[in-house]
Image (cartoon, coloured by chain):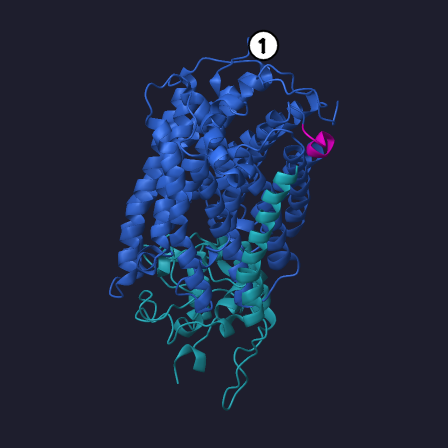
Amino acid sequence: MRLGTTLVSGLLLTFAAAWLGLVFGPYRQLGHLRPAPVALGDPFPSPPSGMAVLGRRVYIANGCVDCHTQQVRPKGSGSDLAREWGPRRSVPRDYIHDQPPLLGDRRTGPDLLNVAARRTDANWHHLHLYNPRAVSPGSIMPSFRFLYERRKIIGSPSHRAVRLPTDWSVKPGYELVPTPEATALVAYLMSLDHTTPLTEAGTP
Amino acid sequence: MTITRPTDSPAPPIRATDPIDALSKATILVFLASAVFWLLTGTLLAIITSIKLHTPGFLGATDWLTFGRARAAHVNVMLYGWASMAGVGVLLWLAARSSRFTLRFPQLLVIAGLLWNLAVLVGTVGVLAGDRTATAWLGFPAHSLTLSAIALILVGASVAVTLLDRREPLAIPHWYVLAAVCGFPWLYTTAILLTVQEPLGGVAQAIVGAWYIDGLRGLWFAPIGLAVVYALVPGLVGRPVASRRLALFGFWSLVLLAAWTGGRRLIGGPAPAWIVTISVVAGVLLLVHVAAVAINLVPLLTARPRPSRSDPVFGFLAFATVAYVFAGALGSLGSLRSVSRLIHFTHAEVALTHLELSGFFSMAMFGAVYHILPRLTGRGGSSWPIRMHFWFSAVGVLLSWAVLTTGGVAQGLALNDPQTPFAAIIGRTLPSLWGRSAAGMMMGVGHLIFAVLFVGSLTRRAEATPRDAADDFTTPDLLRSRETETAAAEPREGSLS
């Protein structure tokens, strides 16, 4: 019993040390970060608003994070900057409002940290989510058709309906309307913009 | 049933035919049977996920089985339904046979088994319905995580008390058992608390997530698998491990380093540089642990003559041991920034994870179950279906590793070349994704054979209980022959045993 206790105490001490290092340490260092002041504007990053908060939940629920990262690595750690996934590396301050953070660990699809800066058209996002291969040939992204409603046009078409290209469409007399989840998801994607310069990221 | 251990009479040698008390036996079987069920569920989800990645239209665009949900369900069912429940069943067996087949608090263990199943069930349905966390390896919704944490603490307490209460010195497998039951409940509850219940914000939470993933591998799956290998292999080949001191060194190097390597998952990412650097160093140093395991165990695998070579359990354990050493070496290599630059975010990282979990851990569990089951139920069986299971699993694991590694390296090279458009990168990985589906189906056939044999063993009529040298691993003769010399030369080292 006594010898086993020695072993167990040793184990607990070792684990406590690692906990102090990799759990408590980062919290002490990063827990107090605040938004950085920006000349002529709101401090960056600003807290997420309205639909984007809801859209973030849709993003998590459907496992977007399983294929898309949200981090831009510096020069020397991959081609992130050269691929124009962002003008600078990402730093801890970029994520202070992220609860939970969605850094991701797989790049089956491209990085999305600054997707709002690249894709500025909400209709493109809707088309892409509904039928990824129609706008992005060779893509293996699943279709998120279940976030859209195909419904018969009664009276005048909905102003929220997705504008379809002429070469593909749902049945004549029908329209494609995003559910609130789809609208929120696109609002979230269109909020993903971390291009504001930060001094600690090494850009002016 | 009894929860007190036998009194102070001189210890009789432990034999497989010693009566195991009914409740302890039932508990072990509850965990193992649940694990088999979840293995089949997880395998089905794995094959669906794998096919969807190269053929996104497969099974249509339904919300419950969209890629992200099916994958999260697969990962978490495999980690917590199959691997952890099988692991607990094996831990209970190892603890039980070390204490004359009597577990402490068996009633609590039955409750733990039921809670755990409930947690996995509720979690899987939750994930498929869209209720999941963002931490990949802790994907079940919060209420499910709480249930399994309670179950885990009950299991840990029972195993630890059973082991610490025994009279004989602790043998090598018992160190690893104690490391698993002390380390993982702490790791699990901390991670749940800080990522789900009272989540840290931003990058600090991502670091906890990374710390947890490596901890789960290094302080839960690795020690359970190694406990099995150290417990059964010396008995099967009829000789002790080369050096007990080396085993002790290997043990402490794992315990010291495994909880420090998590930051290597954030190389290049928005984490403080010191965290990544510490983790890279720990990851590379882990090579000494792998070397210690290799030096101690690999000679046993190739030793001649092999008295129990005909035992099908040996193949699984030998495969598991070699996979552990190989995956450990690759993992240390992958910790280097230069290698990470090539394979980070690619399928090659998935390949390594599968090599560790399917090649090392699952194979060790298969071997352990084939060893334990006849001893619990009194029913043996012919060995050819077990051999078929072995070959399907072995070829499936190797094929999966090979195609995902080559595909992942091609993917990494293409990702690092900014001139290669993203669609072209996907095109380059498609052949390996198809290959992975084929490998997954091969493993699936193996898992089906395993399940059929398991159910058969529970339902068929009792025969004679097999007995062989492997049963004697806790008795003094095999393990202690060299250790007595060591202990005499160095009393302090011996005292830790």
Q: Is residue B26 left or right of residue B138?
A: right
Question: Compared to B189, does B369 lie above or below?
Answer: above
Question: Compared to B284, does A80 lie above or below?
Answer: below
Q: Residue furthest bottom?
A: A40
Q: Colour of chain A?
A: cyan
The quarter of the picture where the N terminus of chain A appears is: top right
Q: Chain of mark 1?
A: B
> Which span of residues is magenta-colored?
B103-109
Does the magenta segment cover residue A168? no
Residue B477 drawn at (x, y percent):
50, 21
Task: Assess disc 1: are there few (<14), some (14-19) or many (≥20) residues with their C-alpha within 10 Å of its C-alpha.
Answer: few
Q: Colour of chain B?
A: blue
Question: Compared to A166, does B462 lie above or below?
Answer: above
Residue at the (51%, 55%) spot, across then down: B211
**Which kind of residue does numbered mark 1 sit on?**
Ala
- As helix, strand or loop, the secondary structure at mark 1 comes to loop
Question: Compared to B228, does B223 lie above or below?
Answer: below
The quarter of the picture where the C terminus of chain A appears is: bottom left
Residue B195 drawn at (x, y percent):
60, 58
Q: Is residue A186 left or right of residue B50?
A: right
Does the magenta segment cover residue B104? yes
Q: Is residue B357 left or right of residue B430?
A: right
A120 or B231, which lies in front?
B231
Is residue B488 shown to the viewer in this render?
Answer: yes
Residue at the (39%, 81%) spot, across then down: A203
Residue at the (54%, 25%) spot, across then down: B474
Residue B18 drawn at (x, y percent):
62, 16
Query: Which residue is tagged 1?
Result: B462
B307 or B417, which lies in front?
B307
Is residue B55 shown to the viewer in this render?
Answer: no
